[in-house]
Image: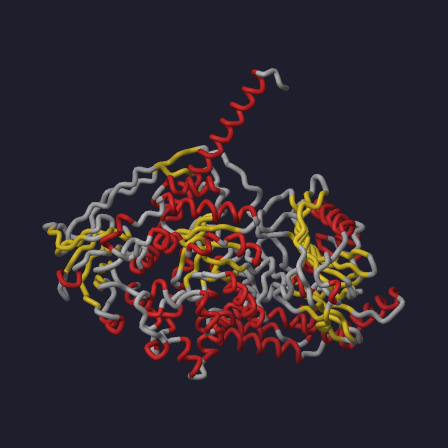
Amino acid sequence: MKYIKWFEELGKKDVGIAGGKGANLGEMINSGFPVPPGFVVTANAYFKHLEHNELSDLIKDILTDLDVNNTKMLESASQRIKELIMSGEIPPDVKKEIIEAYRELCKREGKTVYVAVRSSATAEDLPEASFAGQQKTLLNVVEEGDVVEAVKEDWASLFEPRVIFYRAQKGFDHMKVGLAAVVQKMVESKTAGVAFTVDPISEDYDILTIEAGYGLGETVVSGQITPDTYRINKNSMEIVSKDISTQTWKLARVGDKNERVPVERDMQKKQKISDDEILMLAKYCIDIEKHYDFPQDIEWAIEDGKIYIVQARPITTLKGKPKIREIVGIEKMQKKKGEKGAVGEATMIVKGLPASPGVGMGVAKIIKDSSEIGKIESGDVLVAKMTTPDFVPAMKKASAIVTDEGGMTSHAAIVSRELGIPCIVGTGNATEVLKEGMEITVDGSGGIVYSGKVAVAVPTEEKPSLVSAAGPVITATKIYVNLAEPDLAEKISKLPVDGVGLLRAEFMIAGIGEHPKKMLEDGREQEFIDKLAEGMRKFAAAFYPRPVVYRATDFKTNEYRNLKGGEKYESEEANPMMGYRGAVRYIKEPELFKMELKAMKKVRDEFGLKNLWLMIPFVRRIGEIRAIKEILKEVGIYRTRDFKLWIMVEVPSTVFLIDKFAEEGIDGVSIGTNDLTQLVLGIDRDNATLGREFDERNDAVLRALKHVIKTCRKYNITVSLCGQAPSVYPEFAEKLVEFGITSMSVNPDAVERTRNIVASAERKIMLKKLSEISEHLKIKDKNGIQ
């Protein structure tokens, strides 16, 4: 046959005609692995369909000059192309071969066969591309005419919005990427799931992880249920741990459809597959990994006691085994001393806390509240009592920012560091001393405002930077970045970071400009969802496949009141910092929280950006996270291998109950040192008078951090920290590494500095351990012990 290849006719070199999925199935079946039978409608058939219906030029015209960042344009283009493909006639010779192959499959099996028709893009699962899960899969297809139609639907799915977007982002030529269709016998599985030959959480190459659930494997793959998780030591072939989940329903074939059916009550809490099946499956997975000589993500199913391997593909997200790389050179990062602006007499007029380094010059504009931000023009110096999220559009235009109030962790300080704008906070009287239209120079490094344009020396950086032969220093501790501004996503993604550890929602919502409840009551829920999704998408696309941890809205009531319509919905609170914020809001106003979740779901489902995760801020009680997980289920979001649920640890109650939160079921925590320090020490972090007393290195704070980190490691939960302390205090970073923290998330300006500090801390700890081991061996040798 010209357009059909049976699995037995394919191997791993046939990606060009069968795609990654089809080629891998052929490779495995020819290597003796138990793969359900089937065939591939090759990419040649897809290209023949385009040629037969003269579609190529039409599709090119639709895609020419398409702005993939414009959601409406993208969806419109997608719909037009899919209609062209679906309305076209399948070439008669292609149709004939598909029908003949399906009849042959039924003949081989001795019965009418239900099949799954899955897409297999011809660039899929290559090192530089992974289209897995982006195109269509159709299950329980049984009539030969329906098989033909299902193949056509697969072809059309090559132009889903998320797939067009992905190709554009990766620079793939739309017309050169083809699509093969895998037609494979459906396995009526009693149990099914996925396996990873390298543990995806710890990235331990010695541990294999299996996830299992009752019924068809779609529930596990899509995250609709919480599966059992088994971990196996690949060297000793021992089951290291078993997490047994309760499963109340499963997906099973009822007639020609997959239906949800209840799991028998006495089976709901039982282990889904036996120990013998776990070890047999583990052996298959290890053999597959050895065959490909690369870690594998494997889908499996068990029918009538027989294990089937349904799919295998490389795990492309691993960083590799944590290794201490030899530092072959030390370079000093030096900035030349220089001058900014014209030289003039340096008269200091205001002094405050240096919050963001650099020098900015311009005309002072005094902003009393957010209604006046329109006064700020490009290059002006924004002067205000304090800033809030709705100041951001003006802050982006400013050459520098000066505030009366606030400390090093105030809104103005954090945003300025992210935007790279010089900033001074806590001056006490800038709005009184500085006059509208006054020309000033702001020294963000020294915390001083000068009259007029003056020369300010930029300090020389004398600290060495650790550089390896291959580029930035490698650390076992992941270094994430804190972000909020979508326009900076592409630029910051080029920094040596492992992802976004804190994506703040507030700036995106402030950019929308209206209170979410007002938009909901005005019938504009979808408008809010679309606008928020647009911001989320920019971050997720820029950092893909690195994780982007989105922190749900943490506006305080006074900040919500600044949004249009906010006065109607927000009460006046004496202490908003400790008021109606974070997790409790989502439970009391689930309809608003669901709007955020729907935006997230849109980004993950429609654009295939599965690297977008969720973090819940200001959690106070166990019941809150339990209720939030129920809301997630209502929206159709579940914890899976590619969707993680984190919580912020910033309230002392969360510190004391961290073991209970771990047992409740979370994937990670991020310690918010700013709020946690203020609540442990009883110091308002925005109080300039007490600014010097606010110190994360306090013993009480360190004890809290140690308890959280050690407990999370015990439960195999990711434990991160977001805050500037690790980049400011090397000894603080060293303590975190010593405690066992898995990642730190810092502002963009501190990424490289923090990575160097962490690398140094890791080396010190490693050398200390080696010294202890050496001393121990000397003692043993002295005592004559071999």
Q: Quadrant of residue 258?
A: bottom right
Color style of the picture: secondary structure
Residue 636 in the image: x percent, y percent?
58, 70
Question: Can the viewer see residue 637 in this picture?
Answer: yes
Residue 483 in the image: x percent, y percent?
40, 58
Q: Which residue appears at 71% of the width and 55% of the height?
A: 24
Residue 414 in the image: x percent, y percent?
33, 57
Q: Quadrant of the C terminus?
A: top right
Taking the image as shown, residue 509 lies to the left or right of residue 346, namely right
Residue 308 in the image: x percent, y percent?
78, 57
Q: Which residue appears at 37% of the width and 56% of the height?
A: 675
Hey, which residue is sitting farthest bottom in the picture?
522
Taking the image as shown, residue 693 lies to the left or right of residue 773, namely left
Q: Nearer the viewer, residue 607 or 39?
A: 607
Question: Can the viewer see residue 380 in this picture?
Answer: no
Above-or-below relation of 581 to 477: below
Taking the image as shown, residue 97 lies to the left or right of residue 489, namely right
Q: Nearer the viewer, residue 540 or 69?
A: 540
Above-or-below relation of 112 to 641: below
Above-or-below relation of 151 to 355: below
